[in-house]
Amino acid sequence: MSQITKRALAASLKKLLAEKALDKITVTDLVEDCGVNRQTFYYHFRDIYDLVEWIYTSEASAALGEKKTYDTWQQGFLEIFRYAQENRAFVLRTYHSLSREHLERYLFSETYALLENVVEEQSAGRSIRSSDKAFIANFYKYGFVGLMLDWIGAGMKEDPRALVERLELVIHGSISAALDRLAH
């Protein structure tokens, strides 16, 4: 029952975000739209920003799934773009609000998880320090998230598939090459 209530609150927030800015939505607006009382909201979430964080970590993380290997990273990154497109109002309203940090935290977390798996897979058979692997994953994470934030900020107009294809052309083989240079 708890997950059903959380999903209902998430749906209400997304509905309200189609009409007004996140900073203008109150808990009262949310519970009235959802048909629950304030106590129910506060049982599950500290505030609306906590709900935003829950949406990103639960819904959006499911979009990435198991696409976290060298052969599937492009599909995983494309799934993050697709999630943003399918939840356009939610993503744009959080991007342009005080809770932008929740969107950024989600993007950094999911992108790092994807890249961490890719780097780990590509480093098999090489003697590489964990800190070097983390450095490589972090380096690419910032590039990926920067591209995504620019895309969101520009209104999500460019085709995500074209972005991911260009990104693949730019970084093809560079993770493996970096691991070769760091091996000891």
Image (tube, rainbow, N blue to C red):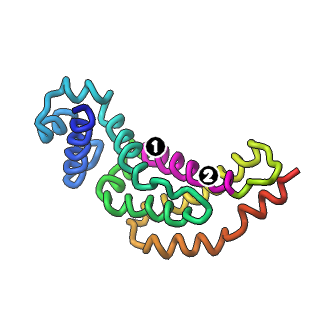
Q: What x and y, as percent, mark residue 70?
A: 62, 62
For the stretch drawn in magenta, the main secondary structure is helix
86 within the magenta span: no
> What is the quadrant of residue 121 in the picture?
bottom right
| Callout 2: SS | helix
Q: What x and y, as percent, mark residue 155?
A: 38, 65
Q: For the residues marked 1 and 2, what is the alpha-carbon distance in whole angstroms?
A: 24 Å
Q: Going 74% across and 42% down the picture, which residue do you hit?
A: 130
The answer to whether residue 10 is visible is: yes
Disc assigned to residue 64: none
| Callout 1: SS | helix
104 within the magenta span: yes
Position of 48 compared to 122: left or right?
Answer: left
Q: Nearer the viewer, mark 1 or mark 2?
A: 2
Q: Label 2 crowding class (10 Å Cα cut-off): few <14, some 14-19, many 20+?
A: some
In the image, residue 78 above or below residue 62: below
> Circle 2 is placed at which residue position?
117
Q: What x and y, as percent, mark residue 122?
A: 70, 58
